[in-house]
């Protein structure tokens, strides 16, 4: 009796494996049919344009690397330097004020007040307190005090840029809160 169910089970397994292999063959056949029937749609490549050489028409113009072109550029730069230098020359000729020996980041604005109707800023440098008025100079970049408010001092600095030309820029010195 025990042989009957075992025999039945083995025969069913054999039948299922036979069906499985047959289904795989059908799948492979279908895939190969689909592959052979499918044709990709590729647009044809257009013909390249014909190259037409152009004549060089700038033969009579100044060559970009010629001495004449270089001379013109140097003349332009020298006239610009003279005009920029004229703006700076009075700055270099005047007597320096004591606060021009220190960079702006070494200074601290600790307060402001109005004295004789004119705003005065109190600037601390190396534990010394200085009174600064509009028109005074601060910092190492020829910074001239333009405006004093309750919270900041606005400066106009004249400094050299990366190319060595003098430029004018704005800078501020802000009120520092008291640290405990």
Image (tube, rainbow, N blue to C red):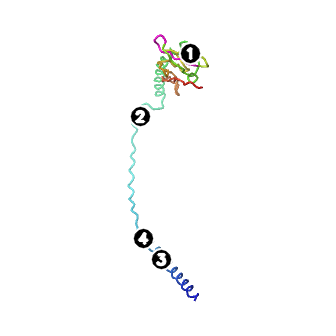
The residue at the far top in this view is: 116
Question: Does residue 114 lie above or below 72 as drawn?
Answer: above
Residue 119 part of the magenta-drawn span: yes
Using the image as rendered, state which of residue 59 and residue 18 is in the foreground. Answer: 18
Indicate the secondary structure of the residue bearing disc 2.
Answer: loop
Residue 73's tag is none
Using the image as rendered, state which of residue 133 and residue 92 is in the foreground. Answer: 133
Using the image as rendered, state which of residue 96 and residue 70 is in the foreground. Answer: 96
Q: Are marks 4 and 3 in contact (CB under 8 Å)?
A: no
Residue 17 location, x and y as percent?
52, 79
Query: Tag 4 or tag 2, which sits nearer the N-term?
Result: 4
Query: Tag 2 or tag 1, which sits nearer the N-term?
Result: 2
Indicate the secondary structure of the residue bearing disc 3.
Answer: helix
State the image quarter where residue 180 is shown.
top right
Read off the residue under disc 4: 34
Using the image as rendered, state which of residue 82 and residue 126 is in the foreground. Answer: 126
Read off the residue under disc 3: 23
Indicate the secondary structure of the residue bearing disc 4.
Answer: helix
Foreground label between 2 and 4: 4
Query: Tag 4 or tag 1, which sits nearer the N-term?
Result: 4
Query: Tag 1 or tag 3, which sits nearer the N-term?
Result: 3
Read off the residue under disc 1: 130
Q: Which residues are magenta?
A: 115-124
Which residue corresponds to the image point at 47% horizontal and 10% vertical from the top-left?
A: 116
Q: Are marks 3 and 1 in contact (CB under 8 Å)?
A: no
Q: CA distance from mark 4 to mark 3?
A: 17 Å
Residue 136 location, x and y as percent?
51, 15
Read off the residue under disc 2: 59
Q: CA distance from mark 1 to mark 4?
A: 92 Å
């Amino acid at each position: 009796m025990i042989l009957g169910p075992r025999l039945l089970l083995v025969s069913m397994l054999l039948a299922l494996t036979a069906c499985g292999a047959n289904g795989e063959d059908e799948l492979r056949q279908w895939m190969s049919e689909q592959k052979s029937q499918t044709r990709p749609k590729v647009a044809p490549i257009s013909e390249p344009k014909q190259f037409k050489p152009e004549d060089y028409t700038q033969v009579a113009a100044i060559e970009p690397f010629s001495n004449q072109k270089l001379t013109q550029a140097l003349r332009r730069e020298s006239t610009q330097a003279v005009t920029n230098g004229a703006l700076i020359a009075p700055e270099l000729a005047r007597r320096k004020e004591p606060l021009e020996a220190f960079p702006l980041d070494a200074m601290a604005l600790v307060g402001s007040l109005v004295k004789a109707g004119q705003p005065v800023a109190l600037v601390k440098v190396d534990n010394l307190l200085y009174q600064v008025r509009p028109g005074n100079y601060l910092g190492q970049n020829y910074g001239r005090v333009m405006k004093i408010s309750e919270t900041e001092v606005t400066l106009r600095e004249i400094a050299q840029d990366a190319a060595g030309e003098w430029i004018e820029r704005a800078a501020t010195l802000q009120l520092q809160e008291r640290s405990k």
